[in-house]
Amino acid sequence: MRARSVKRRQIRRYQRRRIAAACFLVLLLPCSILAQDSSTSTAEGKKAEQRGVRFTYKDRPSLRIGKSVRIDFRAKFHGDFRGFPLEDKKKTTLFEFRRARVGVQGNFLREFEYELETELTDDQPRLRDAYLNLRYFRDFQIQVGKFKQPFGRDRLTAFHNLDFIFRSRIGSEIAPGRDIGVMVHGRFYNRGLNYQTGIFRGSGEDDASGRTIVARLTGLPLRLVPTPEWLRSLELGIAVASSRLPEGTIAPRGETVFGQAFSQRVQVNGRRFRAGIEMEWASGPFSIQGEFIHSRDGRRQQSVRMEDLPDAIARGWYLGATWAITGEKKAEGIHPRKEFLRNGGFGALEVATRYEHLRFASSEHPGPPVAHARAPNIPSTSDRAWTAGINWYLNRYIRIQGNVIRERVEGFPLDSSADRQIFWSRIARLQFVM
Amino acid sequence: MCRAKRFLLAFTLLAMSAVGNAHTADELFDDTIIHEIRLYLHPYDWGQLRANFLGNTYYPAEIHWRGLQVANVAVRSRGLGSRSGTKPSLKVEFDRYVKTQQFLGLTSLILNNSIEDASFLRARLSMLLFREMGIPAPRQTYARLYVNDLYAGLYLMVEPVDKVFLARNFRENEGHLYEYRWRDSYYFEYLGLAPGLYSPRFFEPRTREEDFDPATIVELIRVINFSTDGGELQQFLDIEMFLRFLAVENFLAEWDGILGQWGMNNFYLYRFQGTRRFEFIPWDREFSFKDPFHPISFNADMNVLTKRLLGIPELYSTYLHALRATAIQAGGTGEWLAEELERAYAQMRFAALEDPLKPVSNAEFENEVEAIRDFVRQRRDYVISQVGPVSPE
């Protein structure tokens, strides 16, 4: 009975992925043609703005109702070809239809912004983002609904804008995710100082922690002092998050890029406190981005005899850099100067590299380390990953990415399959975003 | 004076530590007393274990016995039909989280909830009789189990069949040990050449998992089914030993063993190191003592191996001899088995009556014990009457 139900779920998932794949191909074929018509009827549009309901196409299809309602239709698709690990003689290369998201976003009554987005490849389709933002005061906006919590630059970057195929380990494993909540945010000094603070139901859909309070402050401090122009885009940020951890919560668990657990499953209770600092700099075709996150989970009454245990610690950082070889500016995202197959264009080419480190342990080390969920001394484990990548932007819709990743797991290898300490992986991604 | 005091103190401490370390696995399985085992698990984990009793998730725990305590042990729900969320059957592993950790030389321990045996006697008496008849069988003794200092019921503390057991019984443990896993009604039929049809499907490796050599099991089953020469089978089995095993099982009127009602079940198979010779080891005997008039060749025609062996007159005679010897050893009223029954009953009666989680009432428990007494009273005479006069071997 159970096996049949699992089978049915697999079939449903397979069918959904097929539908998503079909949509992907349908959208992929004409997109290079559509890309050539980026500025169609702009002048006409301005005149027509006053005239009731109309349909426009600039970057993406959009429905406008006078000046008061705007509905942009969005679609995002990812297909991955992965081969891993390179040194494995029995390596398997497989294609995975990884993401298929569709949604709408826009605004109405001038001061309200909204977004609704769903993932088609999930077993149970669910809304990824569903929020409403009131922007009447630019320096005091209120956002309500389900959206990403303001913590961690990498985590807050939309997946289709990432420089690499995978998020950083700290962005995936430690930073809080999407949840339902309310956030106040705003900008000062012509975006020189931004703040975001909110209260959320939890720390993410797959995270059991309870009510979470988050605050983030980012800014461009070098704008305020006389500095060379190329340095002024340096953005620095700091974020903190505090969550309640109910009984039965598991601390963030380290996983390698391809999802192999490398740290101990640890029971936590009390409070989870996360703090992060971040930086980003972009000038011309170059960019550098870095981040550090420290997470500390309480383990109140978590020993087998219900005594308090030393906190569980997760800590990591990354530093990445990109260079658009074809010369496009990075600051606002790469837009190819000459799109692929248009007037002999090649698109834009960017190379990127990132080094990162993620470590798990306990705050104190009483006795020898033992690999179980209530061990006083959590075995120290870490993952160091180096990624080299290339991004080929064919046009504004399509991007092809290739990454080679070398990971080195240190400490207690928990899964028997994790005996090998060094993993080489390679992956290619075809991305379509509209 | 001061020096004398210091010496006395040091001597006392040394003596105490010697006593503390003097415990052995033999003492743990000492069946002349009822033991007390204390397990400490986080209440959340204990709740999870009980709620998810069909799973095999391990939870960290601490175990206490006679002043000895072992931390960082792993506990999980175990069993097939005996799984319960109310009174879970438990496996305690000492070396799961700390690879070198042992407890009195043991790497694991079974705490059997006995929920399939309302009398708490069947498995204990069965294993005693197997051992009395010279067949290596796991030791069992009673224990009051306390979880987080609350009485969790009467349990049977069972010695696991593992490398420690093999070393104790066979003086070697580098051979291949397989646990027979009931999947469906199977009685040693030849299913084909593919090793996967037998192992790990039915015969799950418990030692040398990386090199579990199913080919020899295929060969054993091929010989059981097709060899024309009884001598060839002798290369794989100590036939006399196997027939004795069968005799004890049938004397005990076992419904869920090699001649089980629903196919073979509840045994281990050990292949001695560097040989093709297998030996059967009994396991979990909670469906024995069912009927004093249980036929002495129950289901023998269903099982290819027993049908083959008992079809040979000399071997059938050997089997009858073994059966008779078992009946004589067990005895009737007031004899060995009856005495063992009363000894076990006296040990565990109050613990059973106080067991708040047993699935039967106290009256049902007493009735079950009485049914076993009745079995013991009648079984010897019935078996001997069925065996008839046996020619001397």
Image (tube, grey):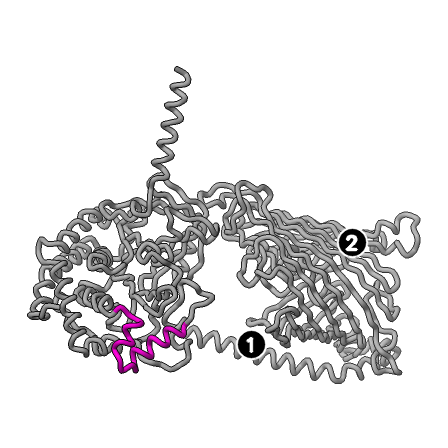
| Of pointers 1 and 2, the one earlier in the residue sequence | 1
Q: Tell me: A195 left or right of B142.
A: right
* Helix, strand or loop for disc 2: strand
Tell me which residue sits at (30%, 66%) in the image.
Answer: B279
Query: Which residue lies under the disc numbered 1?
Result: A13
**Boundaries of the magenta span:** B214-238
Q: Quadrant of residue B363?
A: bottom left
Horizontally, residue A188 falls left or right of residue B369, namely right
In the foreground, B346 or A306 = B346
What residue is pinned by disc 2? A279
Task: Please tell me how crowded label 2 is: few (under 14), some (14-19), or many (20+) other residues with Cα within 10 Å.
Answer: some
What's the residue type where badge 1 is placed?
A: Arg
Q: Amino acid at mark 2?
A: Met
Is A177 part of what is drawn in magenta? no
Residue beneath the point at 80% across and 74% down? A393
Give the crowd class for mark 1: few <14, some 14-19, many >=20 residues within 10 Å. some
